[in-house]
Image: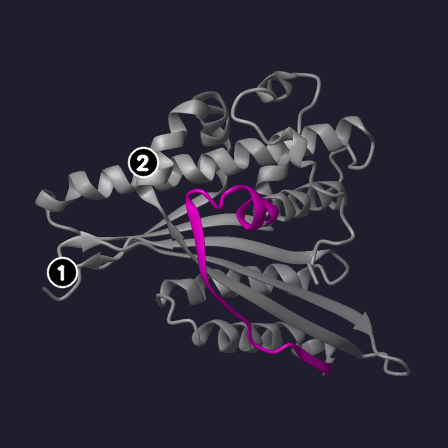
Amino acid sequence: MSAYNHLPTVDLSLVSNNQHVNILKDTGVNVTNDYGTPNLLFFYFIPFLPDDRKPDLEALQDEIQSWNAWELGQTEVQVRHRIADGSLPSDDATASRVKRTNYRAKVVDHLREVSETTWLVKNADSHSGPFSADVKVAEVNGKIRDVLKDFYGQESLPAQFSVILNIITDLIASQPDADNRYLFTYVYYYYDVDQKVFKPDIRQLQFSVTQTAAEGEKDTVKLDISNLNHVYSLLREKWRSVRHEAEEIIEAGLSLLCIVLIPISIPRPPW
């Protein structure tokens, strides 16, 4: 069951390369503050590479960024449509920003499942848990951190990802009543030294955390944490063959990607 079933449906009739891009030029709708809401983020882990490998890295970065920008452009069309029909709020309240951002996450997830199969292949699914227990309020922060690190410790992610989890954990613990659902796109620009080729590790990391009052326990909450991960491959030649048809939506999405993208440098490998 999707973590986003409570949100409006995705209208696939709006998914096009340039047909609906004009809705993004409507200056009467300003939801730019939404992009300070970390429920939808993109992380690019970029290794240090010698100069002779950088042109190939830059070409790969361009392809992956344009792909993610296409997704964000399509997502924003859906958000504007749902604001217009009243099924998403248009105000700047924190809860409204979170709701719109979680809807964006729903759209990204839906696009990858339904609309991107020409250039995107899902290789595997995985999940840990779910975790459910009564926890003392004073221990919630540490428990969320431990559970998420346990979940993602099994995924062989770079050590830097634990720092990200610490920041998100503090945020979740500080706002127990918020809709704490998160969808992260993780890209590791892995370079295979033996084959001298890039093999990007692309994953979708999705988790939710809810806290509800434990019956009869004033200083205790029921803590529920669940996650679901997907591993993808981007078919680069397929994407290159279609991206030229979507330059306007990609351009619109790039301005959004630069806000929600967190590039992280990885130390030089031992070779």
Residue 97 x/y as whole percent:
70, 41
Give me the residue at 83% from left, 32% from top. Answer: 86
Residue 236 x/y as whole percent:
32, 42
Magenta residues, start to end: 110-134
Give me the residue at 40% from left, 34% from top. Answer: 66
Query: How many circles with numbers are drawn on the protein?
Result: 2
State yes or no: residue 132 in magenta: yes
Classed neighbour count for the residue bearing mark 2: other residues with Cα under 10 Å, few (<14), some (14–19), many (≥20):
few
Q: Residue 74 lies in what quarter of the image? A: top right
Q: What kind of residue is marked 1?
A: Val
Residue 112 x/y as whole percent:
53, 48
Q: Is residue 153 above or below residue 182?
A: below
Classed neighbour count for the residue bearing mark 1: other residues with Cα under 10 Å, few (<14), some (14–19), many (≥20):
few
Location of the C terminus by quadrant is bottom left
Give the numbered dot on residue 193.
1
Give me the residue at 64% from left, 76% from top. Answer: 130
Q: Residue 195 lies in what quarter of the image? A: bottom left
Residue 185 x/y as whole percent:
47, 52
Q: Nearer the viewer, residue 91 or 182?
A: 182
Q: Pointer 2: what residue?
A: 62
Q: Are marks 1 and 2 in contact (CB under 8 Å)?
A: no
Residue at far front of view: 118
Q: Secondary structure at mark 1?
A: loop
